[in-house]
Image (tube, grey):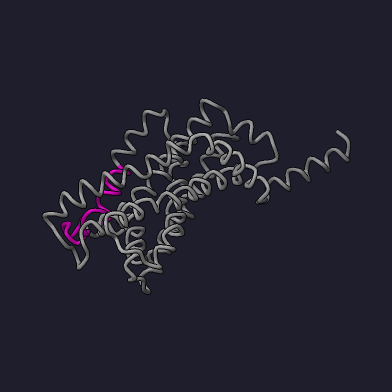
Amino acid sequence: MSTTQTSMTRSARGRLGLFEWAPVRAVWRREFALYRRYWPSTSFAAMVEPTIYLLAFGYGFGSIIGTLYGYAYRDFVATGVVSTAVLFIGAFGGMFNTFIRRTFQHTYDAMLAAPVDVHELVTAEASWLAAKAGVYGCAPLLVGMAFGLDPSWGMLLVPLIGFLTGLAFALFGMWVSAIVPSINTFDYIITGALTPMFLVAGTFFPIGQLPGWAATVAQFNPLYHCVELVRGAVFGRLGLDSLLHVGVLAVFAAVMWCLALWKMRARLID
């Protein structure tokens, strides 16, 4: 190999080692092109699921409970279900989409043949899922307003909360997709981790109703902090403690980014 070729190769490797936004935008354009084909089914699920939750819990249990902490129970559920929508969009997309594209479709092999590095790929895929989570996380609020939830200016913060939470769980899903031996293993993750997360996050009842040890453990649940932020924004109760909730979600997202990048690089390159 000539000196010029060696220099060009080293230069290309050096550029690939940096973070560039052009590959991220390219991955986003690809995702948007795909999304234009399947958006009706995604939108249908995003609207129907919170409607079912509100009918089953908001009006079913709501007729018995009435109010909770001064709020109508249906409003309590509507704000809590936001976190459930964000969780499932982020985590499920990170797990199943990533596993299928890496294992069966070999989509990532084709992407990495272009000037795209693994950290750019991971960031682009996760941020796209986070953007979807931020948008569709507002669907429960729209349904809630149809059932009587009063609109507020704080609702404008919900897409940002959904984006941060969705980013963290999308990266969590990508990390899980890189460590499981088969797609059937996701059943353990869904049943053993994700389902308990949204059940003990304050979604349908305050975590203070749990036994002392369980309430303490629930405070380490990232989804609990999402619920608190959403309710604080919608009901106008944001305060200094909200910074703690944001910090927990940001740290969780940063840790998951490192883990997802580490295992995805091992799967795709090493």
Total numbered badges shown on the rendered structure: 0
Residue 112 lies left or right of residue 152; in this view the side is right
Q: Return the x and y of residue 43 as percentages of the image width and height.
A: 42, 42
Given residues 131 and 188, the one toward you in this image is 131
Residue 83 % position (x, y): 35, 52
Q: Quadrant of residue 52?
A: top left
Q: In this rendering, is residue 196 above or below 245?
A: above
Of all residues shown, which one is farthest toward the top?
Answer: 104
> Residue at (79%, 40%) from the top-left corner?
9
Does the magenta segment cover residue 143?
A: no
Pick the front one: 165 or 173: 165
- Residue positioned most to the left: 64
**Is 80 displayed left or right of 263 in the figure?**
left
Residues in magenta, as a range: 193-214
Return the x and y of residue 226 as percentages of the image width and height: 36, 58
Q: Is residue 169 above or below residue 180?
A: below
Q: Quadrant of the N terminus?
A: top right
**Would you identify the image quadrant in which residue 75 lies?**
bottom left
Left or right, residue 5 beside residue 241: right
The C terminus lies in quadrant: top right
Q: Per the image, is 201 magenta?
A: yes
Q: Position of residue 119 (x, y in %)?
A: 59, 46
